[in-house]
Image (cartoon, grey):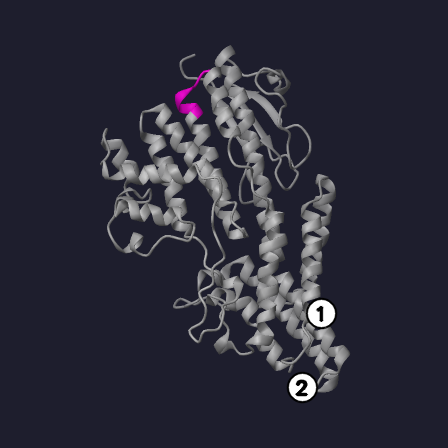
Amino acid sequence: MGAESARSILSGNGASPEIYTERSALDDLRPNQNAHQHFQEYKHPDPRFDEVFRLLHAAAERERYYSPLITNGARDGRPQALLGASFPSDVAIRSAAELLLTRASVVNNRESAWRDILASYRLGRLVAMGPDLEDARLGMQVEQLSIAAVLKHIERYRPNSTELLKCREDLGNMPAPSSVSDKVNLAERCKCLDSLMYLPWYMDKKSANFGSDLIWQGFGKIYQLVLEQGLREADWDPALEEINQSFDETVRILNLANINERRKALDDWERTWKVMRAPYTPPQRGEFSSLSPWEGTPEFLERMETLAWLRSRLDALAKPAGRSGKLDTETESDAVREIGRATAAMMQPVYLRAFITEQRTRQSALNLELALGLAAFHADHQRYPERLADLEPKYLTTTPVDGFSGNALIYRLEDNGCLFYSVGENGRDDDGMLDRHGADDLSVRMENSTDQ
């Protein structure tokens, strides 16, 4: 049973239900239950878990990650919108990564710990290869957990410079990072177009099949506006063109190489989305409110504001004809185009957030590369260098730069080690801090060994 449960994680199609309803080896080792305690208390873990770990390591050695966008279909045989396609179980994948990292953190075997960390790191890169942003988000989460584990591994075992060079080689053999812009350009574009094409096919809420109520509280509510305006027989080409133009511009901006140009273009593009939002008052949460947590998120508010804007625009276009009158061809085309704009605008902020997460993950990987070079220098000299340039060429061929500023990373020596950091998305030096008040520096602090 343990092996079968593990196989469900590795399939790329989500964990099978029995992994949560029946007792298995993976259940016994879940990090949020007792895995840490298990490995700390027993020098020889239960052999039932050997097969679980073997399968996790085998999965991490794959060249690709297979995660098709599978729709379930409606009960009446109609297809389901692609937006409602099922995703791999993020709980199962996170559990697999955390399981590997938990064992690595507590078992006193450096080589075994390093193999587990590498397996988790590779798993994150592989998952991020999936077709859409959910795959990217999940893969980047696992990668960031793994990067933190590498830093702790260095601090715990203090490998020498030769061993650190081998660590760098191992990390250099990871699958290449996946691209958010590629996913936006293909899978996310197709999901958005598919969602809108659903309108002329099934024009009532009862037959709408987007996969979940959360998705219905966005794209699905456009159904109601379409019916209200009598647009059932409309030509939908203008809406599809509007969506494609919006995606073309988003992908163009995300692929801009110059940091400052990209940041300005993203700011300008985001302002155009904000214009397409009208005031919306969220429902009040009472003591016995049944509102879901989703309704308190920025994404929900943005979707409702976009729908409010769309309603006002459609009402304005339909007003000359009267609520019961038929729109003329030109007005109908304008209304359909506005629907396309709103459909695209609903998801644009999500793409921007995913892109920023991607940039932070890539910067974290660059920071890790620098940390390995600093650790190797320290292993040879029992101190950290005065300048990052002192690492070249022996410890680093080229010193990584700050991907958010295009400048050198900020670096300084401290009483007990050194600190370096990127200024993050805000482009501001926040003294290496990351908090809820706008500071978003990506920092790494390295301490001197305690045996000095």
Residue tagged 1: 238
The residue positioned 40% from the left and 13% from the top of the image is: 451
Q: Nearer the viewer, residue 105 or 449?
A: 105
Q: x, y percentage for residue 126?
A: 48, 42
Amino acid, disc 2: Arg
Residue tagged 2: 323
The local crowd at label 2, few if under 14, some if 14 to 19, many if 20 or more residues have their Cα within 10 Å, is few
Q: SS of the residue at dot 2? A: loop
- In the image, is residue 391 above or below residue 279? above
The residue positioned 51% from the left and 73% from the top of the image is: 208
Residue 102 within the segment the image draws in magenta: no
Q: Quadrant of residue 226?
A: bottom right
Horizontally, is 228 left or right of 258 in the view?
left
Q: Quadrant of residue 346?
A: bottom right
Report, in whole angstroms, how far the alpha carbon at label 1 lies from the one at label 2: 23 Å
Q: Please report the bounds of the magenta region as a residue range.
A: 154-160
The residue positioned 54% from the left and 16% from the top of the image is: 384
Q: Is residue 282 visible?
A: no
Q: SS of the residue at dot 1? A: helix
